[in-house]
Image (cartoon, rainbow, N blue to C red):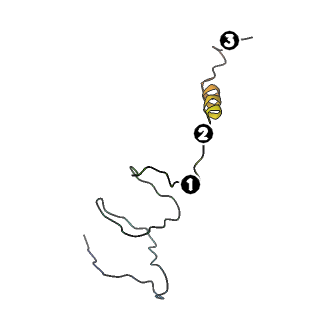
Amino acid sequence: MTRLIVNNLTNLNQNGPVSFLNGVNVAAGSTIGGDVSITGVCTAVSFTGDGSALTSLPVATISLVVGYKFLFSFDECNSPRT
C-alpha cells in the first residue's frame, strides 16, 4: 500500500479547497479536527451525540403513526365489515 504524508494540501490554483475526484476514504479510528462540510450523502454505522442541533428532519406526529399503522396493516379479507 502506498503512503503519502504531507503537511498541507492546496488546489492547483492555490485559491480554494482540494478536490478529490474519486472520493476520499477515512480509515477507522481517524480523527478530523475543525469544521467539516459534506455535500451529498453521509452514511455511517453510528452517529454520536444527542442530536439537539439536527435540522430539517421529518416529524412524525402521533396521528401519522397511527394512520400509517392502520393503512399498512389493513387486511381486507380479515377486517370486520360494517
Q: Please state which of residues 57 and 71 is positioned toward the viewer in this rendering.
A: 57
Quarter the N terminus occupies: bottom left
Task: Please tell me which of labels 2 and 1 falls first in the chain.
Answer: 1
Q: Label 2 belongs to which residue?
A: 60
Q: Residues within 10 Å of mark 2 (few under 14, many from 20)?
A: few
Determine the residue positioned at 60% across, 39% down.
Answer: 60
Gap in angstroms between the C-alphas marked 2 and 3: 28 Å
Residue 29: give x, y in percent of width and height: 28, 60
Instruction: Estimate the x, y position of residue 81 in percent, counting from the top left.
Output: 72, 11
Callout 1 crowding tier (Cα within 10 Å): few <14, some 14–19, many ≥20: few
**Which residue in the protein does label 3 denote?**
80
In primary-sequence order, the first of circles 2 and 3 is 2
Disc 3 marks a residue whose amino acid type is: Pro
Q: Residue at x 67, y 18 (%)?
A: 76
Coordinates of residue 27 in the picture (x, y in percent): 31, 62
Of label 3 and label 1, which has the lower sequence position?
Answer: 1
| Above or below 82: residue 19 | below
Q: Between residues 15 and 35, which one lies in front from this camera angle?
A: 35
